[in-house]
Amino acid sequence: MINIHEVEETNEMIEKENLDVRTITMGISLLDCIDSDLDTLKKNIHEKIYRCAKDLVRTGEEISRDFGIPIVNKRISVTPIAIIGSSACHTEADFVEIAKELDAVAKEVGVNFLGGYSALVSKGMTPADELLIRSIPEALAETDVLCSSVNLGSTKTGIDMDAVRLMGTIVKETAERTKDAPLNACSKLVVFCNAPDDNPFMAGAFHGVTEGDVVLNVGVSGPGVVKKALESCHGQNFEELCETVKKTAFKVTRVGQLVAREASKRLGEPFGIIDLSLAPTPAIGDSVADILCEMGLEQAGAPGTTAALALLNDQVKKGGLMASSYVGGLSGAFIPVSEDQGMIHAAKAGALTIEKLEAMTCVCSVGLDMIAIPGDTKDTTIAGIIADEMALGMVNAKTTACRLIPVPGKGVGDSVEFGGLLGHAPIMPVNTFSCDEFVNRGGRIPAPVHSFKN
């Protein structure tokens, strides 16, 4: 039972420390929508999503009002569209038609984002996979709330380098297609290694084929809460530091568990997982970088940063696992540059580089996230950065991801504004030495030896 002391603590965290439920994400299987006729497929998709999600936003708002807990986003994830469209789609334009249908129904039910314009190509691409990937620039340019992801590798299968090379070009094309739009669409495009089937966070959410027909996943965030808690153990040893983070993560996860169970009851759909991820926002006091500084670093990126982040990530997971039996998704700490005021400040000060962020990827969730790079960065260089990130995930048997944003017409020293939760970012320098011959080899990097555990 939750006692009055916990209620008071939770109210304090919500009112003063930026605690929120970042998202309720409804995962919807579209496998039963598959049809060889494109118009029939689009009709089936629209009807299924509307039927399942028509009450999602209203229910989220009611729970937020009834319990006084901010629920920032209501989202939908669907089965990877490369699978769903494989029979009906014979051109890139056919996949774009599905993208527009998904965008339309997402707006109709009122959600913030819909994820799942995705392909899973860790070992190779089917013709449908390649068509969807090549359609991404147009699909994201022609839609508003649609998000796209591509899984390029896994510990079990290795890395599909043909797909990595292709994604280097796709990222560059997506940036060019939306250079005059209010938002650079690369902010809605992420590539993964070891992508989880139940991730509620965008832009990487999709509804895995191992999931049920409809499921509710909840993402909770609270960097401000953790930082405030750490202020009480300033200068104490690592044991006290770890205990403080763990206890705080437990309390934050309990809030998510409450919302998840209530949403499941009211919507009549099963609860899936709680994703306890310290996902920052541009708001002052809601920063993962500030947590690292509270641990004793002058800036995120200083020597000791990777160790501090490893400690934080591990204790967050330990606390979450004690609070819920169903912790999943990406659970840990996100380090998106544009969405975290402390990370932005560290990048501008020169304390944080892409190479340091790559090292930090080894011990946190996701990795190179919301990083603005010069618009003239070569597509082969982008592919090389993606390959490095995929290798970290493959060898360490963990999820890693890359969301790079080339900004046409801008270079190092400039900055770019994304707005809202996406914030703003300085253009970060990229290593300009060539990797062309390496990424153009083609084929697949094989799985590491420790993947053979059967």
Image (spheres, rainbow, N blue to C red):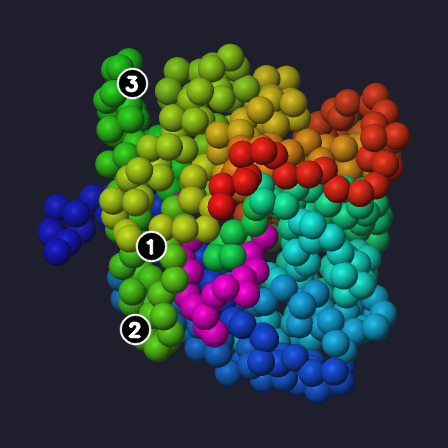
Q: Quadrant of the N terminus?
A: bottom left
Q: Is residue 109 visible?
A: yes
Instruction: Give the CA distance from mark 3 to mark 2.
Output: 41 Å
- The residues colored magenta run 204-221
Q: Where is residue 406? Give x, y as percent.
A: 77, 39
Magenta-drawn stretch contains 206: yes
- Callout 3 amino acid: Phe
Q: Give how far apart the Cα atoms at labels 2 and 1 are.
A: 16 Å
* Residue type at tag 1: Tyr
- Tell me the kind of residue under disc 2: Lys
Q: Residue at point 59% right, 67% down?
A: 79
| Magenta-drawn stretch contains 220 | yes
Q: Residues within 10 Å of mark 2 (few under 14, many from 20)?
A: few
Residue, disc 2: 265
- x 11%, y 51%: residue: 4
Element under disc 3: helix
Q: Along the polypeptide, which appears first: circle 2 or circle 1?
A: 2
Disc with the residue nearer the chain's start (3 vs 2): 3
Question: Can residue 164 be seen here?
Answer: no
Query: Toward which corner of the image does residue 371 lie, by quadrant?
Result: top right
Do tag 2 and tag 1 residues touch (Cβ < 8 Å)?
no
* Residue under pointer 3: 238
Q: Which mark is residue 326?
A: 1
| Corner quadrant of residue 352 | top right
